[in-house]
């Protein structure tokens, strides 16, 4: 079956189309088409809930050289709608690999198209902006004016990917996960004698965020995005983490309300990551807007003045810097650093309350570890607030 190729089409909402191939006969698969510039990490991207509803174009020309393994998943499911690539490696070679990319695509029936000019496609998206698209077999019928094209812009993806039940995890439960080749050099776990209680509000949590907290010895309670203020306080958290997630943050209205109450009434340290950053800023009174083609890659510079860090990013929305200055928000809440590619807001910090957030992934899976220290800063902040009170 892997030696049989099926003709396939990628059709964009503006009428542009590309011809390619797939490893099985496609039906009709639609989503918002975006691109990721990373040279590695395709397995993490497949399983990252932040990509729910999206067709992902990989700008790196060949995928699959290292296969896939059991350790690098960011969740228990595949969340991307489909993938677009220039080429798939015919063989894979890595000591952890237990399946090839081609076998994975066929076994999971993951929609895909390859053999197209991804450089041309990426330049088109950069020029026109992200838009909806479908991939399908040439014999399939699909009307480009079909309302299904616009569903992705009005879908609350957070409500789809968030956990449905509250669950608890700590280090003893996850010894095999934590003590892997990725973390064997990490000595941080012995630096904190107190196991702090962290409530993670799940907007589409990546497993590596939980791993980073577990390495620091935290006891973690993961709650749904619609969890109320009283339930969160019931778990007596020492800190609250707002996770990453997919889609437009303004759809998470109840979460914004809950986070606003946490900010002003709980005196509990809060860290927001990616979607969590946007929701925290909305709760503070800032605005968000949709980026033309988003930030998705492993080498986005973030900094201020002469200092910068290289970060992993994956988001299509950003906090409006203008909204800080069009209100009194800037007197209590500040933009602490910017994305140095387009000067959008990268980090925010409250001047009086233990609240801060970042528009990138300090857990960086995949990606650089320049900002990995933020989890330790978060726990040190918890330690400071706890003993100060």
Image (spheres, rainbow, N blue to C red):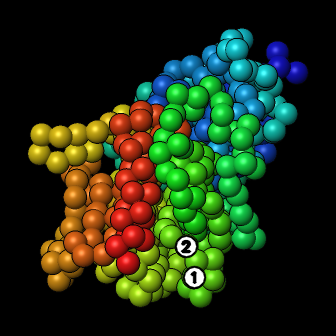
Q: Is residue 207 visible?
A: yes
Q: Is residue 342 visible?
A: no
| Image location (x, y in percent) of residue 140 | 76, 45
Furthest residue in direction left, as rendered: 305
Q: Nearer the viewer, residue 215 or 191?
A: 191
Give SS at disc 2: loop
| Image location (x, y in percent) of residue 218 | 58, 56
Distance between mark 2 and mark 1 Cα atoms: 7 Å
**Image quarter of the C terminus:** bottom left
Q: Is residue 255 above or below residue 368?
A: below
Q: Which residue is mark 1?
A: 233
Q: Is residue 116 above or below residue 94?
A: below
Furthest residue in direction right, as rendered: 1
Write the residue at 36% across / 37% down.
Answer: 370
Answer few, some or many: residues within 10 Å of disc 1's Cα (few below 14, many 20 plus, some between 14 and 19): some
Q: Are marks 2 and 1 in contact (CB under 8 Å)?
A: yes
Q: Is residue 29 left or right of residue 150?
A: right
**Quarter of the image where one finds residue 157:** bottom right
Give SS at disc 1: helix
Write the residue at 53% across / 78% down.
Answer: 255
Q: Which mark is residue 154?
A: none
Q: Nearer the viewer, residue 68 or 154?
A: 68
| Image location (x, y in percent) of residue 16 | 50, 42
Q: Which residue is mark 2?
A: 237
Write the residue at 58% across / 28% down.
Answer: 184
**Image quarter of the N terminus:** top right
């Amino acid at each position: 079956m892997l030696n049989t190729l099926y003709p396939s089409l990628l059709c964009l909402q503006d009428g542009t189309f590309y011809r390619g191939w797939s490893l099985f006969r496609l039906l009709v698969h639609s989503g918002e088409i975006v691109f990721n510039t990373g040279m590695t990490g395709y397995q993490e991207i497949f399983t990252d809930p932040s990509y729910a509803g999206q067709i992902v174009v990989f700008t790196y020309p060949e995928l699959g050289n290292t296969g896939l393994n059991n350790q690098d998943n960011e969740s228990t499911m595949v969340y991307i709608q489909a993938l677009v690539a220039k080429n798939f490696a015919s063989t894979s070679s890595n000591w952890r690999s237990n399946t090839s990319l081609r076998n994975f695509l066929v076994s999971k029936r993951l929609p895909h198209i390859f053999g197209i000019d991804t450089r041309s496609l990426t330049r088109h998206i950069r020029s026109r902006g992200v838009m909806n698209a479908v991939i399908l077999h040439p014999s399939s019928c699909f009307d480009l004016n079909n309302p299904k094209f616009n569903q992705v812009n009005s879908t609350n993806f957070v409500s789809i990917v968030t956990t449905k039940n509250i669950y608890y995890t700590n280090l003893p439960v996850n010894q095999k996960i934590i003590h892997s080749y990725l973390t064997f050099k990490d000595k941080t776990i012995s630096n904190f004698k107190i196991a702090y209680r962290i409530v993670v509000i799940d907007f589409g949590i990546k497993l590596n965020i939980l791993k980073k907290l577990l390495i620091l010895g935290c006891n973690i309670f993961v709650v749904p995005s619609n969890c109320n203020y009283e339930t969160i306080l019931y778990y007596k958290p020492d800190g609250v983490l707002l996770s990453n997630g997919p889609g437009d943050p303004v759809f998470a209205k109840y979460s914004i309300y809950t986070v606003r109450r946490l900010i002003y009434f709980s005196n509990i340290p809060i860290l927001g990551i990616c979607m969590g950053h946007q929701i925290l800023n909305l709760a503070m009174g800032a605005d968000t807007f949709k980026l033309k083609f988003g930030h998705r890659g492993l080498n986005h510079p973030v900094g201020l003045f002469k200092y910068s860090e290289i970060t992993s990013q994956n988001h299509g929305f950003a906090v409006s810097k203008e909204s800080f200055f069009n209100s009194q928000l800037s007197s209590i809440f500040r933009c602490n650093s910017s994305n140095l590619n387009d000067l959008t807001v990268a980090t925010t910090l409250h001047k009086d309350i233990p609240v801060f957030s970042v528009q990138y992934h300090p857990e960086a899976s995949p990606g650089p570890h320049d900002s990995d220290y933020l989890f330790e800063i978060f726990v040190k902040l918890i330690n400071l607030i706890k003993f100060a009170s």
